[in-house]
Structure formats: structure tokens, C-alpha cells
Image (spheres, rainbow, N blue to C red):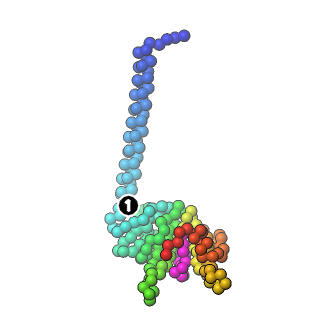
Amino acid sequence: MVVEPVSQIQSFEEQTAEEQTQEEQTAQEQTAEEQSDEETVFEAVMDFSEFEAFGNAHGNVIPVKKDGLWGAVNYQKEEIVPCEYTGFWAAPDSEGTFILTNSTYDEYDLERLTYYIFNRDGKLLYESGADDDKVTVSGGLYCVADSIDYDDTSGEILGRVSYYKADGTMIYSEPCEITAMKHFVGKISD
């Protein structure tokens, strides 16, 4: 059995600790440098001073508000939807599908919303035809829930829930009671 002097063991432990500290410091410097580079690139590409507001960026889409109206730009800050919509309803999902709205008011001064679903390229996928349509986007799909009839027997408003791919292809559609539509679409705002 070889016994090393205590000073050699301490020296080795100190050297190892010093190497670990240097490695951690180098990693921290690299991380800080990478973050700085990312911030510089983001700031250089995304100057939002011309916009009044903007929504969450996702799927290569950033909703933006200019002159009181909403539209969208891509990550290269190219306009994909002109700022001509009164509202921003849903942030882009992972595929860049998002929803803008237009408000109108009826003779009773009640707000009526028209929903517009766009894909990441700014192509209009869906425009609601009735105020009672509710829409949502998630995971590259969009869902439309609308009232279709009134059941005199039960007193229930009947609806239809339909799911579509981002290209507009319907993948599922089923009639249901309007109260059940909340489970499909999520919380429905009035």
C-alpha cells in the first residue's frame, strides 16, 4: 500500500476544485455571452417602437397593434396580416394559428364579434358568420362551436363543434347541447 503525503492529497483536491470553479466560470461566461447575443439579435430584428402593443410571439407570428387596430407580423417583422382588426382574441399556437376579431354594435348597443382565424402565413382559415360562434386554436388545430338550432322540447340550444386542421380540412364535427360546447372549446367568454 502506497501512502501519499497529506500535502499531495490536499494539493490534488485544491487543483480539482480550482479546475471545477474555472469550468463553471467559463460555462457561466459562455451562457451570458449567448444570452447577450440573443438579446442583441432580438433587439436588432424586433424594434416594436412603431406599434402600440403586441401579443405573445409563437409559431413565427407576433400579433401587433398599430393605430388602434390589430394585425400580425412574422419573426422577420414582415406584415402577414394588416392592422385592420379591432381585437386580438387568441395568441398564436405552436403552429402559428391565431385569432383576430372585429366588433360591431347592434341596435341595442350590444357588441357583436366576428372571429377571423389565420395561419402562420396570414392566410384566412375561417371567418365566423354569427355572433354566437366561438372559436379557439391549439396545437395546429382550430375549433369552431356554433349554435345551430333550438330544441322546443328540452329548451336547449343545440350546437355543433367542429375541429379543423390548419389547412382548413375538417377532421371532426358533432352536434351537441350548447352547454357541452364549453367542454370542447374551453371557457367561452360572453
Q: How many marks?
A: 1
User: In percent of the image, x 54 and y 81: which residue is there?
Assistant: 129
Q: Is residue 145 above or below residue 42?
A: below
Query: x, y percentage for residue 128?
Result: 53, 79
Q: Residue at x 36, y 53 (%)?
A: 40
Relative to 147, say whether 80 is above or below.
above
| x and y percentages locating residue 155 in the rendered image | 62, 82
Closest to the observer, 114 or 132 = 132
The part of the image, by quadrant, that contains residue 46 is bottom left
Tell me the element at label 1. Answer: loop
Q: Nearer the viewer, residue 41 or 173?
A: 173
Residue farthest along the bottom direction in this orientation? 107
Report the residue at 52% width, 63% height from top. Answer: 93
Whether residue 123 is visible here, answered yes or no, is no
Up/down of 157 relative to 164, above or below: below
Image: magenta residue range = 123-136
Residue 128 magenta-highlighted: yes
Task: Please tell me whether residue 131 belongs to the stretch shown in magenta.
Answer: yes
- Outermost residue to the left: 49
**Which quarter of the image is occupied by the N terminus?**
top right
Residue drawn at the location 65% of the way across and 85% of the way down: 152
Q: Is residue 148 above or below residue 81?
A: below
In the rendered image, residue 148, in percent from the top left (x then y), is placed at 61, 81
Q: Does residue 75 appear in the picture of this structure?
A: yes
Residue with the mark numbered 1: 46
Task: In this rendered view, identify the residue nearer to me: 76 or 143.
Answer: 143
Q: Amino acid at mark 1?
A: Met
Residue 178, position as x, y percentages in the image: 60, 76
Badge 1: how crowded within 10 Å, few (<14), some, or many (20+)?
few
Quadrant of res 104? bottom left
Q: Along the horizontal axis of the image, is 68 left or right of 179?
A: left
